Amino acid sequence: MTQFDLTNAHKEIGKQLRNLRIAAGKSINKAAIDAGVAPRTLSKIEDGEANFRILTLVKLCKAYNTDLSQLLRDFTLPPPFANQCQNSKI
């Protein structure tokens, strides 16, 4: 498992998204169309240069025939953040 570094989280998620897109055999343009995002936006997300919304991640995962839990399965929060999440009341 990868330690989830919150300062670089968007870069790590971008790498994962690129890997999923490539595994799905999709170009940036095709994936962007399928997910309803601009190709430039997808490129920036994959390069770790853009912030994104959870809904965008869900749309991209759907375009890649996977789900958000699969995208994030290899990440764990560092102890201080993991403890905060476990103790939070949602």
Image: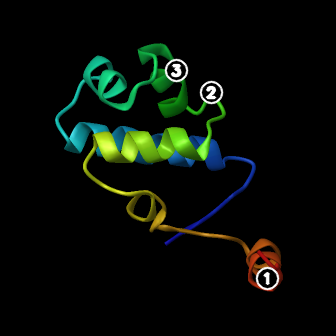
Amino acid type at circle 2 is: Glu
- Does residue 82 lie above or below 52 as drawn? below
Give the farthest residue toward the left.
25
Amino acid type at circle 3 is: Thr
Label 3 or label 2, whichever comes before in sequence order: 3
Pinpoint residue 65: horizontal percent, then vertical percent.
25, 50
Pinpoint residue 13: horizontal percent, then vertical percent.
52, 47
- Does residue 62 lie above or below 90 as drawn? above
Q: Quadrant of residue 82?
A: bottom right
Q: In terms of secondary structure, where does tag 1 sit?
A: helix
Q: In terms of secondary structure, where does tag 3 sit?
A: helix
Amino acid type at circle 1 is: Asn
Give the residue number, with chain letter if any, for mark 2. Answer: 49
In the image, what residue occupies the spot 21% across and 30% down? 26
From the viewer's perspective, tell me whether residue 58 is left or right of residue 84. Answer: left
In the image, what residue occupies the spot 49% across and 44% down? 57
Give the residue number, with chain letter if any, for mark 1. Answer: 83
Label 1 or label 3, whichever comes before in sequence order: 3
Give whichever of 25, 62 is nearer the camera.
62
Instruction: Point out the frontmost of discs 1 and 2.
Output: 1
Pinpoint residue 49: horizontal percent, then vertical percent.
62, 27
Q: Are marks 1 and 2 in contact (CB under 8 Å)?
A: no
Give me the disc on residue 41: 3
Q: In terms of secondary structure, where does tag 2 sit?
A: loop
Give whichever of 89, 5 is nearer the camera.
89
Q: CA distance from mark 1 to mark 2?
A: 28 Å
Q: CA distance from mark 3 to mark 2?
A: 9 Å
